[in-house]
């Protein structure tokens, strides 16, 4: 059977039905967000499960010099942030960066209502600026997992800053690597061109082991190789 767009939509619905269970709070979060004027562009619940799972898989083994740290770029309404926070080890934290004050404030309310407000900090500002500040504040190997979901044309610039911050064995996760409204076969679309360059660079990066998970609009998962012994 050809993998047509109709076939893809069928697969997407099936995955969501079988692997997309979520609680009542998350189920209605984006309805509240849309009613408040926020765009309906959050990840789907099946991607949420993947995010929670990946965070749980990067819990530090045993007591270390610091707790687990996850950095998200692009908070929107806090939907993906809640999934990330639910994967954390005890004492772990998510720092999520959002440029739009209205989105940041909305997300903070939802994070508190979901019971993860104490584990999440919403940082106001442009993702690239805040990332540079965090690198100066936190230093090398200070982050267990990055989730990129802000400006698609900036993913490569985010990674240029984030690379040194990611600990060996840590994960780089990026949303919309197969589309965000556009499709990956729409040659010439500017976001598509930037994402295509980013995907190819990451896939060829000797420091990373990389997979693409074609859920929803595509999720890239890359693991920073362990330091040579
Ligand atoms: N991760 C969210 C969706 C994020 S949508 C989820 O899946 O639930 C992208 C978000 O990035 C929007 O809220 C938008 O306001 C924000 N954004 C746009 N430009 C930004 C920038 N330069 N820095 C940080 N956030 C930005
Ligand atoms: Mg996204």
Image (cartoon, grey):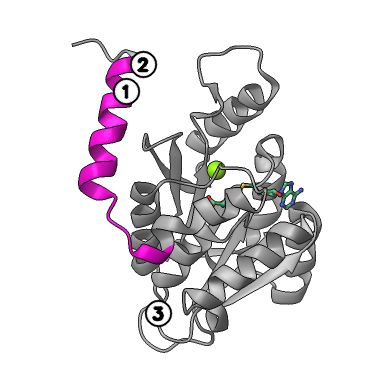
State yes or no: Cβ of the residue under disc 2 lies below 8 Å from any atom of ligand 2.
no
Q: Residue at x 53, y 40 (%)?
A: 205
State yes or no: Cβ of the residue under disc 1 lies below 8 Å from any atom of ligand 2.
no
For the residues labelled 2 and 1, the Cα–Cα distance comes to 5 Å
- Residue annotated with mark 2: 5
Mark 3 residue element: loop
Q: Is residue 220 magenta?
A: no
Q: Residue at x 51, y 20 (%)?
A: 183
- Residue annotated with mark 3: 89
**Range of magenta residues:** 5-25
Residue 33: image location, x then y, percent: 59, 54
The answer to the question of whether label 2 and label 1 lie on touching residues, with beta carbons closer than 8 A, is yes
Would you place residue 25 above or below residue 185 in this image? below
For the residues labelled 1 and 3, the Cα–Cα distance comes to 35 Å
Would you place residue 103 above or below residue 191 in this image? below
Residue, far front = 35
The answer to whether residue 90 is left or right of residue 41 is left
């Amino acid at each position: 059977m050809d993998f047509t767009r109709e076939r893809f939509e069928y697969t997407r619905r099936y995955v969501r039905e079988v692997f997309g269970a979520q609680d009542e709070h998350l189920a209605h979060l984006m309805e509240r967000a849309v009613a408040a004027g926020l765009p309906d562009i959050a990840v789907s619940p099946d991607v949420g499960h993947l995010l929670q799972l990946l965070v749980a898989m990067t819990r530090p083994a045993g007591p270390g010099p610091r707790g687990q740290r996850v950095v998200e770029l692009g908070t929107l309404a806090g939907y993906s942030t809640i999934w990330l926070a639910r994967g954390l080890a005890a004492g772990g934290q998510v720092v999520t960066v959002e440029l739009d004050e209205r989105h940041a404030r909305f997300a903070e309310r939802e994070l508190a209502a979901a019971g993860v407000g104490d584990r999440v900090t919403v940082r106001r500002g442009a993702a690239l600026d805040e990332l540079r500040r965090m690198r100066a504040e936190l230093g090398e190997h200070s982050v267990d997992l990055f989730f990129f979901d802000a400006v698609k044309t900036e993913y490569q610039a985010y990674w240029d800053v984030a690379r040194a911050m990611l600990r060996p064995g840590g994960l780089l996760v990026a949303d919309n690597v197969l589309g965000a409204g556009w499709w990956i076969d729409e040659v010439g679309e500017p976001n598509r061109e930037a994402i295509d360059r980013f995907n190819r660079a990451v896939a060829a990066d000797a420091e990373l082991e990389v997979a693409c998970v074609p859920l929803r609009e595509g999720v890239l998962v890359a693991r920073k190789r362990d330091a040579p012994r």
